[in-house]
Amino acid sequence: MTVCAVLGGQWGDEAKGKIVDYLSEKTDIVARFSGGNNAGHTVINDDGKFVFHLIPVGVLWPNVQGVIGNGVVVNPDVFLSEIEELEQKKQNVSGRIKISDRAHIVMPYHVILDNLNEISKGNDAIGTTGRGIGPAYTDKAARIGIRAADFKDMNTLLSRLENVLTYHNAIIENVHKKEPVSVNEIYEQCQSWSKKLTPFIDSVEHIVYDSIESNKNLIVEGAQGALLDLDHGTYPFVTSSHPTIGGACTGLGLLSSQIDIVLGVFKAYSTRVGGGPFVTELLNEQGELIRELAQEFGATTGRARRVGWFDSVAARYSARINGYTSLVLTRLDVLDNFDSIKVCTHYELDGEKVTDFPGNISILEKCTPIYEEIPGWTTKTAGLTDISKLPSGARKYVDRIEELIGIPIGIISTGPHRDETILVNPVL
């Protein structure tokens, strides 16, 4: 029995979906634990391209069960559309996907509030995906949220909707000067959802517990990345949940002692979406080139991602708060076209060396990256599956990142397809 957590080490978009898919052949259950449909996981296999926002990617393997934990906020329309798409692509997932009855629901009024809040902030907008994720987590913390379990008791649900919309409509009408949300319309929508969602709703915590007791293998599928964590990220330019290892425990009902392996997934360079400090950001032709070569546009929003060199200061911090046992380096092939590549080894602030990732973003924004330049390579790495075939320059780059973070690299991704992967060391 092995429990393996696959976590984003940067600001998300590290190709966690591909890595989870690659590892899922040897597992029994894949479990999402945080976030919502603000995250996008892309998998390319022999059946085509799949983009998931809620459903665990492991279900593309026929014997894997996918579960959505209590830490996830679920948009029913998105979930049901993903089920429909899987069926259209001849993927039989019948009986293999479950949603925690404790998972909170992203309601239509959450999407409305998300967009109204962003508009009202003007130039101070954080750059959310506008999917209602933040307001859904806000309701959860305020103890007025709607949970999946509520769809099994529609009379109680109506009463809860009346209470929560009294609160939200006061804000919508008096602060944003917009029309109130109709309780009846939302309730009718919930009735429709209830009929379709009920077969998927279950006690996921018990499923996870029983699987571990039965010595089954479990992969914990992270969404987004450590630097977007509500507590540990670049606050306030963060998400509303916990994509770090602690979130895996609370979002699935896992004990920390039950997690055997923690994989930190990093791109061979850095990206982030939306606002917030980004010390190694490239605002030049090199950044544009990486963006175009890698097609760095969000799977959820389509927004162009900001691009920069690899930041080992941020990576070491990410490793410290997550306790990675092994690293995964993705998108190495994107750097095949560069004569030289830079890695940030530390920052500088007012002439002083900075080796720890600052928690204060006003300080972080003033930091200057100090780079080490590494010769590039002219031989392509794209599609390689054997570590011995890596060009010497690429091998030196991989070794240097491993040295700077202080954790061994177990997997290298050299392309989007599940087979375009180098297994450096067994990780399961």
Image: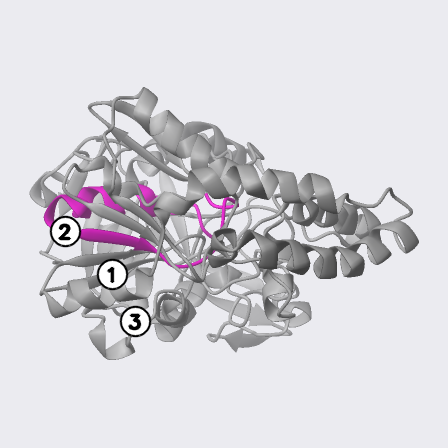
Tag 2 residue: 27
Q: Say which element carries label 2.
A: loop
Task: Tell me which segment is drawn in magenta.
Answer: 11-39
Depth-wise, is mark 1 or mark 2 nearer the camera? 1
Q: Does the magenta stretch include residue 29?
A: yes
Q: Is residue 336 above or below residue 108?
A: above
Quadrant assignment for the C terminus: bottom left
> CA gap, disc 3 to disc 1?
11 Å
Residue at the image point whose x is 65% and y is 64% from the top: 236
- Name which of mark 1 and mark 2 comes first in the sequence: 2
230 or 323: nearer the viewer: 230
Residue 51 quadrant: top left
Compared across the picture, whether 337 is left or right of 328 comes to right
Question: Amino acid type of disc 1?
Answer: Ile
Q: Where is residue 423 in the image (x, y as percent from the top left)?
A: 12, 48
Locate the N terminus and report the quarter of the image it occupies. bottom left
* C-alpha distance separating marks 2 and 3: 17 Å
Q: Earlier in the sequence, mark 3 or mark 1?
A: 1
Residue 414 position by quadrant:
top left
- Circle 1 packing at 10 Å, graded few (<14), some (14-19), many (20+), is some
